[in-house]
Amino acid sequence: MNSEDINNLQNAFQYGVNLGSSPNAVSTSPTQSFMNTLPRRLSLSKQQKVLKPFSTGDIKILLLENVNQTAISNFKEQGYQVDFHKGALPEEELIEKIKDVHAIGIRSKTHLTENVLKHAKNLVTIGCFCIGTNQVDLEYAAKKGIAVFNSPFSNSRSVAELVIAEIISLARQVGDRSIELHTGTWNKVSNRCWEVRGKTLGIIGYGHIGSQLSVLAEAMGLHVIYYDIVTIMALGTAKQVPTLDELLNKADFVSLHVPETPETKNMISAPQFAAMKDGAYLINASRGTVVDIPSLIMAMKAKKIAGVALDVYPSEPGKNGAGSFVDSLNSWTSELVSLPNVILTPHIGGSTEEAQSSIGIEVSHALSKYINEGSTIGAVNFPEISLKALDLDQENTVRVLYIHKNIPGVLKTVNNILSDHNIEKQYSDSRGEIAYLMADISAVNQADIKDIYEQLNNTDAKVSIRLLY
Ligand SMILES: NC(=O)C1=CN([C@@H]2O[C@H](COP(=O)(O)OP(=O)(O)OC[C@H]3O[C@@H](n4cnc5c(N)ncnc54)[C@H](O)[C@@H]3O)[C@@H](O)[C@H]2O)C=CC1
Ligand SMILES: O=C(O)CCC(=O)C(=O)O
C-alpha cells in the first residue's frame, strides 16, 4: 500500500456520517488519534481492513473487581477510555456509571440485574472476567441487545488444584493445626487423620472443573465417581453414577462443581447430608447458594460431616478488607467459624496469576472483536456468528450489525432495505427471542449509510443497530 492509498482510506473514514445521536449506534467518524496510528496498523495487517466506524477514543469501558492488567492494556491499545476500579461498586454508584459506558467488565460480585441494566443506555457488551455468568440477567441483556461474554475455562485448572489442596488439608485437619500453632498451641495428633489414597471422591458436575479435578485426584490414588445431569465420557477410571444419592452414599469426599441455577439452589441440604457417609467431607467451590449452610452446621455438630471447605457463600463482600465476613453478611457466620475442621477461603478458586492473566486476554479480546467487528463468537446469551474481516480494497463496503426480535418476516424487510446494494456476505442466527444479522454490503456511498441506518432504525423488529465501515 502506498501513501496515496493510505490518504484515500483516511478520506473515506473522515467522510463517515455521525450517527452518535442514536443511543445504540456507536458510530462517528474516527478521531485524529486513530488516524495517527493508521499507517502502523496497515503495515501490521496488509490484507485486512480495520473496521473503525466510530471514534475509538469515544468508547468507554468500565472495569470493576480488579480485572487483570492484561485486559486494561488490551483495551488501551484499542484506544478505548478505561475506568478501572479494584472492587465492586454499590448498586447506586454502579447505576450512575453504567449510564454512560459502552462496555463493562466484571467478575463474580457485580450483579447486573434488570434494575441496573435498564439504566445502561449505551451499553453494547458485558464481559464476565470469570466462568460463572449467574450474576448477570442474561435474558434481559439479550432483549436489550447487549452481548455477554465470559471465559469458559481459563481458571478451571486453578480451581481443581485448590480443591486437591483442600481434600488433603481436610483429611489431615491442616487448617485446625495451623490455627492452633498460630495461637501458640502445639497439638500433635493422628486421631481421625487419614491418607487420601484409596478413598472415594464424588464429583457433582463433571464439566471443565469437575473433569480436571478427576484427573488430578486419580493421580493421587483416589477412586473417582461423578454425578451429572448429562451423560459425560469418564476420564481415566472414573465412573458416572446415575443418581445424586448413589454418589452421596459412596463418597468419602464430595466436591461440588455445578453452576448456579434454580435446580442447584440448596442442592445439598438436610436430606443430602443424611445420605452422606458418616465422617465424609464436603467441598464447595462452585456457588454459595448450592449448599444450605444451616443444614451443614447441623450435620457438622452431629459429627455426620467431618470437615468442610468453602470458597463461596450466598452473600460475599464487594471488596477486600477486615470486618466484612460477619453475621450481618450471612447470619450463620460466627457459628460456622467456631466449628472444627472448617476451611474458609474468600472466593479465590480462580485467583491465580496464570488464570487471571489469560482471562484478561481472552475476555478483552472477545469484547474488542464484538465492538470493532461485530463477532459474537463465545457470547453466552446471543447467537454466535462472525464474518471474516473485510479486505483493504473493500473501501465502500459497510458492515451492518442488526440485532432484532426473532419474529417472522424480518429478513425480508431488511433485505429490501439493503437490496439497492450488493450483499457480499450475510449471516444470521437466532437464540430464543433474539436474532442477529451481520451483512457486508458493497458499493455504498456516505449518503447511503445514513439512509440505510435510518431505514433499519424504523423497522418494528429492531433491537439495536450498528454500522461499521
Ligand atoms: N470458586 C471459584 O473461584 C470458581 C467457581 N466456579 C464455579 O464453578 C462452576 C462450574 O464450572 P465449570 O466446571 O467450568 O462449568 P461447566 O459448565 O464446564 O460444568 C458444569 C457441569 O455441571 C453440570 N450440571 C449442571 N446442573 C447440574 C445439576 N443440577 N446436577 C448435576 N450436574 C449439573 C453440567 O451438566 C456440567 O457438566 C461455575 O458455574 C462457577 O459457578 C468457576 C470458576 C471459579
Ligand atoms: O475470580 C472471580 O472473581 C470469580 C471466579 C468464579 O467464580 C468464576 O469464574 O465463575
Image (cartoon, rainbow, N blue to C red):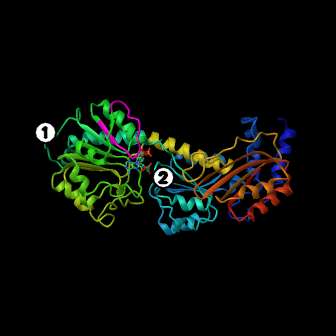
> Is residue 247 shown above or below 411?
above
**Residue 128 in sight in this render:** yes
Question: Please, is residue 134 above or below residue 159 in the view?
Answer: below
Label 2 SS: loop
Residue of label 2: 66
Residue beneath the point at 34% across and 59% down = 322
Q: Which residues are magenta?
A: 224-237
Q: Is residue 350 left or right of residue 71?
A: left
Graded by Cα atoms within 10 Å as few (under 14), some (14 to 19) or many (20 or more), the crowding at tag 1 reads: few
Residue 199: horizontal and vertical position, in percent? 23, 36
Residue that mark 1 sits on: 190
**Residue 134: numbered disc:** none
Q: State the predominant SS element of the stretch in magenta.
A: loop
| Residue 384 falls left or right of residue 448 | left
Q: Quadrant of residue 453?
A: bottom right
Amino acid, disc 1: Ser
Q: Viewed as shown, does residue 159 lie left or right of 126? A: left
First reached walking from the N terminus: tag 1 or tag 2: 2
State yes or no: Cβ of the residue under disc 2 lies below 8 Å from any atom of ligand 2: no
Amino acid tagged 2 = Asn
Which is in the foreground here, disc 1 or disc 2?
Answer: 1
Do tag 1 and tag 2 residues touch (Cβ < 8 Å)?
Answer: no
Task: Tell me the quadrant of the picture where the N terminus can be found.
Answer: top right
- Tag 1 secondary structure: loop
Q: Residue furthest right?
A: 4
Residue 11 position (above or below residue 20): above
